[in-house]
Amino acid sequence: MAGMKDAIMYSTLDGAKKCAKQLKTILGRSGLAFPLGKCQAAVARAGDYSDWHDLACRIDRRPDTHLPYDYWGALIRNLPEPCHLPVRAYLRDEFASEEADEARTKCWIRDTLPYLANLEIVHRSTTPLLRPGSGKDQKMRLQIVSGMLLDIERQLGFTPKFDPVTITAIFDGAPAAILPKLAAHPRFSEAITALTAAGILNMKSETTYLHAPDNEELRAEIIRRARGWNVQKESEIKSVQMTPEQSALFQQQSDIDRQEAGPKVPYDTLDHRGVSLQSRYSVAHEFETMKAVVDAMPADVRLRLTSIWCDSKACAYYHVVVSLGMHHSALAEQIRRCFLAATVGFNGLSVEHGSHDTQFDPEWPADEAYISELFEV
């Protein structure tokens, strides 16, 4: 599974080449047109090289520190915004259990369709040549742009790709093949000519490019809208309506649990040596315990973690989140040992990486030793 592969920073030129090909495959599955050369450049910058040529020249002379390096985090930071979600989703193993064709379709819907739809919205509302009053064939021009981006005629084989750098939709085929019904209109060719002259359409060989407006603010608007697309489509969280009496009782019990948890600190989150520590009820001794656990961790473990959360309500139950792409097969067990080295035990421990969650049952070594002694007697 993708998310559970050991996270190892490339240390050779061949390793870097594999990383670049891997990135191209991840983005290509989502319908993003990101050439291998751009993948190589992003992979090089993620490794703190200026470009691929710099990497090829210096990689054999670079020392290995043996400390974990957030390659995936650095890679994402060096990619255009539309590439971020596909890479994070790969690390979370989204659609990993799906058939290849079904997974590609779902990736395209998640990662490319939002940009096509919002490219259409922004063009429709801001591009002068497509707005009412822009002259003869305005409706035809708008129908062409909307029809291509929204696949109005549902032509099989014309699923567009998307260039995440230029915010451009890329179609295999000419507009007349993509919109055969509309192409039968006598003014279709004139409308295509006008769109081409305005720089909205561009045709090379058997490929058609539909460009975003030549305005940085509008391109940023397309990206902003697309980022919120999947959030808008998330299913509504089911809720239970409480009576005022039930709500009061629930709040009263919550207040009692919080009070009985022990002395508090005036914060819910604390950054300690790069790890975010969180306590449900802001309990002082829970923060001290988590700090001790972090201090007991070797750098190779600590630098891979994002956060540790203590559920004050469950008492000594901890949830550890590993940074996406920083996992390795032995990490969960190493984290467990660090907890046992720094504490007297726990009521539960979970280690999360993407969609994977490793659970450890309660462990209280002193109590277990005491019980063993009783049975021996």
Image: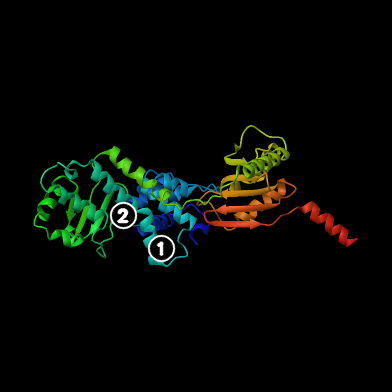
Q: Quadrant of the C terminus?
A: bottom right
Other residues around mark 2 within 10 Å, as few (<14) / some (14–19) / many (≥20):
some
Q: Position of residue 120 (x, y in %)?
A: 26, 48
Which quarter of the picture shows residue 260? top right
Report which residue position mark 1 lands on: 103
Query: Would residue 142 be found to the left or right of residue 267 on screen?
Result: left
Residue 57 appears in the picture as rendered: no
Judging depth in this view, the residue of 273 and 54 nearest the camera is: 273
Judging depth in this view, the residue of 122 and 253 nearest the camera is: 253
Q: Secondary structure at mark 1?
A: helix
Q: Residue furthest right?
A: 377
Residue 149 appears in the picture as rendered: yes
Eyeballing the image, is 120 above or below 105?
A: above
Query: Would residue 210 be found to the left or right of residue 299 on screen?
Result: left
Judging depth in this view, the residue of 179 and 274 nearest the camera is: 179
Q: Amino acid at mark 1?
A: Ala
Report which residue position mark 2 lands on: 33
Judging depth in this view, the residue of 134 and 316 nearest the camera is: 134
Q: Position of residue 126 (x, y in %)?
A: 23, 41
Q: Position of residue 363 (x, y in %)?
A: 73, 54
Image point 29% across, 37% down: which residue?
Answer: 217
Q: Amino acid at mark 2?
A: Ala
Q: Secondary structure at mark 2?
A: loop
CB-based contact (under 8 Å), mark 1 and mark 2: no
Residue depth check, mark 1 versus mark 2: number of the one nearer the observer: 1
